[in-house]
Amino acid sequence: MPETAKGEEPKAQQRRLAVTLFRTGQKPAEIAHHLQRSRRWVYYWVAYQHQHPHTRFRSVSSAPHHHPNQTPRPVERQILHLRQSLLAQRTPRLRYAPAGARTIRRELGKRRVKPCPSLSTIQRILRRHRLTTRTPPDEGTPYRPHPPAPYPNAVQATDIITRWLEGGPVVQTFTTVDHWSNAAYATIHAEKSTAAAREHLLATWRQLGVPDLAQFDNESVFSGGPHPQVLSALVRLCLYLRIEVLFTPVEEADYNWQIETFNHLWATQFWAKHHFTHRWRISPALHAFLRWYNTDYVAPRQPETPTRLRAGQQLRPLPTSLAAQIPESLPISAGLVHAIRCVADDGQVTFLKEFFPVGKRYRSQYVWLTLDTAQQSLTVYYQAQAEADWHLLKVFVYPLAEPVKPVLKQFTCLHD
């Protein structure tokens, strides 16, 4: 018998004896005197046994029935109902919305639920009902410097996702995300080509605005193919508009977590919920998804939707008249091309298909390379941790095979 039950047993025996003596005809005053209790106590347990014939005369738990910090049952039921509703796509407005804690909390706020639980509380409720999945632990990647994005269009990242329709047609989706606001723009193309990428970037800059830095991965469409010291047509396009270029670490998609988060959302909430048989059917649905994403979705680490964050900000969209002045064949313009690279075991890094020695002491660490086309020099910097000082490691002469042109004034004005 548990210790609590042992402690209750003498009290239960005394109550049981009082009721038994009362049933045999003994007077309540005598019972109270014999058990050293009050007559009121005797009458209470006689009445209690009459109402609960099968009672064991044990005391009811004195633990509180209500906890001040506990989420009310109706709110918890509403959280679970919202979760099921989001998974089942019962609401057209939330067709593309994920079913996580952030979406649930936002919907509770719209319904003016009081008190509105925090994200951690919602996540705890979902976990208690086994409606969540565990996130794999971080394996401790060495520090990788990131470009700062303190204002809209300071950094725009572009990526490509390849999908196949039923029957074999391929779909190339070019996507660009603004790091500051997480605003996104995407276009559908039949092939992964320089022409398609150029068309997407020009359309994006008309829609989202011209960035100060364009971030790409190392696909040949962006980087220029297998030949060394080749500045691709897209790099030339960016430099022509006085946009700096940054190439992410090789084969490290998680470095660009903003666009990878969008890609995951797009794959699970858009592509998995549609069945397309023709490429031309995708664009209208994609525009509806982007409209929901930019106006109603709050991205991770963001306080508001992209549209609300960008309201009242200076966005500098590319005018159609200026876009028409950009020639198909572009020169190398004065500007900066950056790359984040992990130093190999032999102390070297690659940049535009060439190897440059940095030093074995920096192996497995990440360095920042900057090509200044005007100065024709390649500079290597190292930062040990965020907020730490930058250290200049190397400066290489980087001669270009073509003359470098200055940026035209009409494109320079886009950044003023």
Image (cartoon, rainbow, N blue to C red):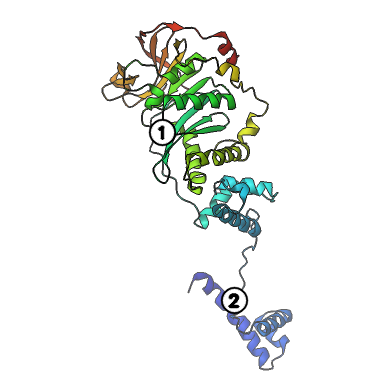
Nearest to the observer: residue 78 or residue 385: 78
Q: In terms of secondary structure, where does tag 1 sit?
A: helix
Instruction: Please tell me in which quadrant of the rendered image residue 180 appears.
Output: top right
What's the distance in space between the residues labelled 1 and 2, CA to CA?
63 Å
- Does the image show residue 133? yes
Q: How many marks?
A: 2
User: Percent x, y for residue 93?
Assistant: 63, 47
Is residue 77 left or right of 161 when viewed as pictured?
Answer: right
User: Percent x, y for residue 316?
Assistant: 61, 20
Cβ atoms at labels 1 and 2 below 8 Å apart:
no
Q: Quadrant of the C terminus?
A: top right
Q: Classify 10 Å Cα crowding around label 1: few (below 14), some (14-19), many (20 and above).
A: few
Report the mark closest to the observer, 1 or 2. Answer: 1
Check disc 2 and report the residue beneath it. Answer: 58
Lower position in the chain sequence, tag 1 or tag 2: 2
Check disc 1 and report the residue beneath it. Answer: 253
Q: Which residue: 48% across, 39% down? A: 279
Say which amino acid is labelled 2. Answer: Arg
Say which amino acid is labelled 1. Answer: Ala
User: Percent x, y for residue 399?
Assistant: 35, 8
Nearest to the observer: residue 110 or residue 174: 174
Asked if 195 appears above or below 41 in the picture, the reply is above
Asked if 314 appears above or below 58 in the picture, the reply is above
User: Percent x, y for residue 233?
Assistant: 42, 19
Q: Classify 10 Å Cα crowding around label 2: few (below 14), some (14-19), many (20 and above).
A: some
- Does the image show residue 208? no
Q: In terms of secondary structure, where does tag 2 sit?
A: loop
